[in-house]
Image (tube, grey):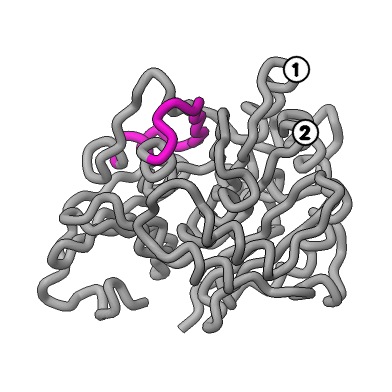
Amino acid sequence: MDIFGQKKNNSGTKILARAKSEYNDIYVMQKGSKREMWFRKKSDFFLQSRIDINKLDALILVYTKMLACALLLKPAPASILMIGLGGSTVSNFLSRLYPQAILDVVEIDQKVIDVSKKFFYLKETPNYKIYNDDGRQFIRKMSGRKNYDLIYLDAFKSGSIPFHLKTIQFYEDVNRVLSARGVVASNLYGKSNLLKPNDWKTFSGQFNKIYCFEDYDSVATVLLATNRIETWGMSDFIHAAKIFPLLVPFSFLDMAKTYRVDKLEKDDGAVFEDNFSKGGFDQMIEKNNLDRTKFVSYPIKNFE
C-alpha cells in the first residue's frame, strides 16, 4: 500500500505516532509538511485524513471538498452534525467557516479524538463539541431534542463502514433530527466501493432528492440528500458556487462541476436493512463497531 504516494518504508516518511484501541490501529505519518492519519488492518492501510501543517485552512483530499458541496444547498447552517471525526479536517474547516454555528461531532473511538487533538489541531470551543459515542446511538438520543441543518456521514473503520450506519432504518433516525430544509452529505469512498448503487437505493427510500458528486478519476463519491420538493441541476449548483457568500480555500465552482446527473440512479441496487432485531440493537451495534460480526456487511477495499 502506498503512503504519501511512496512505499510505506520509503525514507522521508516518518511515523509520528501509533495508537491502538479496541476499534482501530491508528498511525500518524508525516512527509514534509503533509501529515496523515491512517487506520491499519493486518497488512492494509486506509487513509483517513491529510493536512498541510503550513496551510491548515486547506482541504487537500478531494472527498473533503465534495462534502463541502452540501453548503451550496445550505450556505448558512445554524447547526451541524458530523458522524465520524478522523483527523478533524472537515470539522475544523466548518468550525472556522461558521464559528457561530452549533457543531456536534460524534466519534466512537476515544483514541481517534486524542490523536486529532495532539496531531491534527482539533480544539473544541463552546459551539464545537466532540462526543465520544456511537453515531446512531447519539442521533437517537438527540431525536426530539435537536435538529440539524447539515448532517455529515463520514464514519469509517479499517476496511469497512459499520453496517448499522448504512441502513434505511438508520436514515429514518437521521431524518428525525434533520431540519425541514436540511441536507445530509455522505462519503461513499472511492472506486473500490461496489456497493454505491445500494447506497443510492437506500437513501432514496428515506429522502426526497438525492445528488451524486464524483471526481473524474472516481477517487471519491459523495451523496447529498434532502427532503426538499424542488430539484437542482448542474446549472443550479454552478450558480450557487458563483454566489457563495464566504471565502473557502478551494474552487467551489470546480467542485460544483463534479455533480453527476443520473449517476448511480439507474444502477441496480438493493436497500440496506438492519440485520438485527430490536431486542438485539445495542449488542449488534457493538459487534459492528468492533468487527465481531460473522460477515462484514459493508467492506471497503484499497484500490491500487
Residue beneath label 1, please? 144
For mark 2, does the 10 Å Cα neighbourhood hold few (<14), some (14 to 19), or many (20 or more) residues?
Answer: some
Q: Residue at x 86, y 58 (%)?
A: 271
Q: Is residue 51 left or right of residue 224?
A: left
Please identify the quarter of the rendering in which residue 20 is found: top left
Residue 58 is covered by the magenta coloring? no
What's drawn in magenta, residue-wise? 97-115
Q: Residue at x 35, y 57 (%)?
A: 249
Which comes sooner in the sequence, label 1 or label 2? 1
Please identify the quarter of the rendering in which residue 178 is found: top right
Please identify the quarter of the rendering in which residue 50 is found: bottom left
Q: Which amino acid type is shown beneath numbered disc 1?
A: Gly
Q: Is residue 121 left or right of residue 213?
A: left
- Give me the C-alpha separation between circle 1 and circle 2: 14 Å
Label 1 SS: loop
Question: Residue 90: horizontal and vertical position, in percent?
Answer: 43, 48
| Residue 199 visible here | no
Q: Which amino acid type is shown beneath numbered disc 2?
A: Ala
Q: Is residue 136 above or below residue 54?
A: above
Residue beneath label 2, please? 180
Q: Is residue 183 left or right of residue 17?
A: right
For mark 1, does the 10 Å Cα neighbourhood hold few (<14), some (14 to 19), or many (20 or more) residues?
Answer: few
Question: Residue 263: horizontal and vertical position, in percent?
Answer: 74, 75
Q: Is residue 224 above or below residue 197?
A: above
